[in-house]
């Protein structure tokens, strides 16, 4: 009944000092996001590396760290559309030196259109950031006007915008990638690939045993082949998710994070070789160790190489956490020649990683066409070294997380023409758990981010299985 007193005491207004502290944290998070975006787009630093190195990030609470990552990730994921929207709202382009203002605007647009941040937060905080930048404070009015216009017409600016094929996805990747994908896959499939990158990816786990049990504890679904998949929070209503370290089974070493696509090469090896137990396996470019751990779990006698001391140390830490063992060596796999009688060589070669853009949106803006031939040359040297390390009758599984044909089928064609004793061993339907959509007519694995849509997608991956017949 109206007017009836309640048992709850009236809410006390927050102390001014607490409000000031909360405001400072909010501004700090957005300021860090602007700096991280600059690290990726101007300094060409991978986002994960920039996150690890930023001095202020570790001081933020988990919720605020995740908010920073969501801000930067969403901005990079939709950068093409964001820049298109800004071009419609600026009377003239910003000068090249105003890179910080450009990034402040980008993050403001990402908040308004994709994270659904309230208008006052997505505008006022960005204007305050500009005001704090001293010599660039003169851009306050411009930033305020542009972001207020966008927040007034969120629905209009959120719609698909004119792009190369009429879809937002098509303008959300650099032109060189779009041209490569349309040439390789056709406009229709290239559009589906680009659009798939706009969605937040799920989180996949490889478990040591009892996938159904851990699926219940992790609130996940069991996929074909035993991978577990946990759905992300909606990108439209950002909420923090638990830290990986706080999820059930992490401390006990019962699983590790690994996309379904990345897990398939070792599963193909296990299915085609019957049993990896006791087999001598060389993992040539092993860090951070997801496939090394799969091989060790399958009982293989694993030698794992990596040319980065830091990444190799991370591999060792990962092995220790899940209580698995492998021989690890700091070495350049192209010249390492300690043994040459391996039953299996797994070569997960360094590549442009364009198949992982939905998971690592910075990749699209860190790579350029010049990287492809350089990496292809390295891949050829690694394949040559892999063949030399195999015993007669041994198996080489070559794979990359790239969508570029130069890093996949073209490398296998070159390998077959250069090594007369090498032959393709087609991957069979049952070796990929009936997922025939990701098999090519030649018998290679070729997953695209738009494949397995009914299962919420898969990273782009290429793999070919070869045998050393003599």
Image (spheres, grey):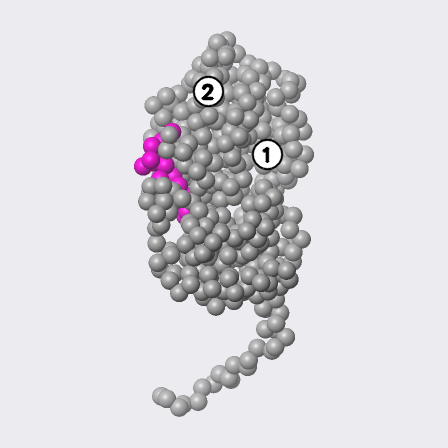
x and y percent of residue 409 in the render?
Answer: 43, 23
Question: What residue is shown with label 2?
Answer: 412
Q: Is residue 57 above or below residue 4?
A: above
Left or right of 59: which side holds 281?
A: left
Q: Is residue 219 above or below residue 139?
A: above
Q: CA distance from mark 1 to mark 2?
A: 23 Å
Q: Quadrant of residue 271?
A: top left
x and y percent of residue 46 in the render?
Answer: 57, 42
Q: Is residue 370 magenta?
A: no
Q: Residue at x 37, y 47 (%)?
A: 168
Label number found at residue 287: 1
Residue 206 or 234: which is nearer the viewer? 234
Label number found at residue 358: none
In the rendered image, is residue 83 in sight?
yes
Q: Residue at x 47, y 54 (%)?
A: 92
What residue span does the magenta drawing correspond to?
A: 184-199
Q: Quadrant of residue 184?
A: top left
Left or right of 434: which side holds 27?
A: right
Q: Please identify the quadrant where the N terminus is shown.
A: bottom left
x and y percent of residue 93 in the render?
Answer: 49, 52
Binning the other alpha carbons within 10 Å of mark 2 as few (below 14), some (14 to 19) or many (20 upward) gives many
Q: Is residue 279 above or below residue 230?
A: above
């Amino acid at each position: 009944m109206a007017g009836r007193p309640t048992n709850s005491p009236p809410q006390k207004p927050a102390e001014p000092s607490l409000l000031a502290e909360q405001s400072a944290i909010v501004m700090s998070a957005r300021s860090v996001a602007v700096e991280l975006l600059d690290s990726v787009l101007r300094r060409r630093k991978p986002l994960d590396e920039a996150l690890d190195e930023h001095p202020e990030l570790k001081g933020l609470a988990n919720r605020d760290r995740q908010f920073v990552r969501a801000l930067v990730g969403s901005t990079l994921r939709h950068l093409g559309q964001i820049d298109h929207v800004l071009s419609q709202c600026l009377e003239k382009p910003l000068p090249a030196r105003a890179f910080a203002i450009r990034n402040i605007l980008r993050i403001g647009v990402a908040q308004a259109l994709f994270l659904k941040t309230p208008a006052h937060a997505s505008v006022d905080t960005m204007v305050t950031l500009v005001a704090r930048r001293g010599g660039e404070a003169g851009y306050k009015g411009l930033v305020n006007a542009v972001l207020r216009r966008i927040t007034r017409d969120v629905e209009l600016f959120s719609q698909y915008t004119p792009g190369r094929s009429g879809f937002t996805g098509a303008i959300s990747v650099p032109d060189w990638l779009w041209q490569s994908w349309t040439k390789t896959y056709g406009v229709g499939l290239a559009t589906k690939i680009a659009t798939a990158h706009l969605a937040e990816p799920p989180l996949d786990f490889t478990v040591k045993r009892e996938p159904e049990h851990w699926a219940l504890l992790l609130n996940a679904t069991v996929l074909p082949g035993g991978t577990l998949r946990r759905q992300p929070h909606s990108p439209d209503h950002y909420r923090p998710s638990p830290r990986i370290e706080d999820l059930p089974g992490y401390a006990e070493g019962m699983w590790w994070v690994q996309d379904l696509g990345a897990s398939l090469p070792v599963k193909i090896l296990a299915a085609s070789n019957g049993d990896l137990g006791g087999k001598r396996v060389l993992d040539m470019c092993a860090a951070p160790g997801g496939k090394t751990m799969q091989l060790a779990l399958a009982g293989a006698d694993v030698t794992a190489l990596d040319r980065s001391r830091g990444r190799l140390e991370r591999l060792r830490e990962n092995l220790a956490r899940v209580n698995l063992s492998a021989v690890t060596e700091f070495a350049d796999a192209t010249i390492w020649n300690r043994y040459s009688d391996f039953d299996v060589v797994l070569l997960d070669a360094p590549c442009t990683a364009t198949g992982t853009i939905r998971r690592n949106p910075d990749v699209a803006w860190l790579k350029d066409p010049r990287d492809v031939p350089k990496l292809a040359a390295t891949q050829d040297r690694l394949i040559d070294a892999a063949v030399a390390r195999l015993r007669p009758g041994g198996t080489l599984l070559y794979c990359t997380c790239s969508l570029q044909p130069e890093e996949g089928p073209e490398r296998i064609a070159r390998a077959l023409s250069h090594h007369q004793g090498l032959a393709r061993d087609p991957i069979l339907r049952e070796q990929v758990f009936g997922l025939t959509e990701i098999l090519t007519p030649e018998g290679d694995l070729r997953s695209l981010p738009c494949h397995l849509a009914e299962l919420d997608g898969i990273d782009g991956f290429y793999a070919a299985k070869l045998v050393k017949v003599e």
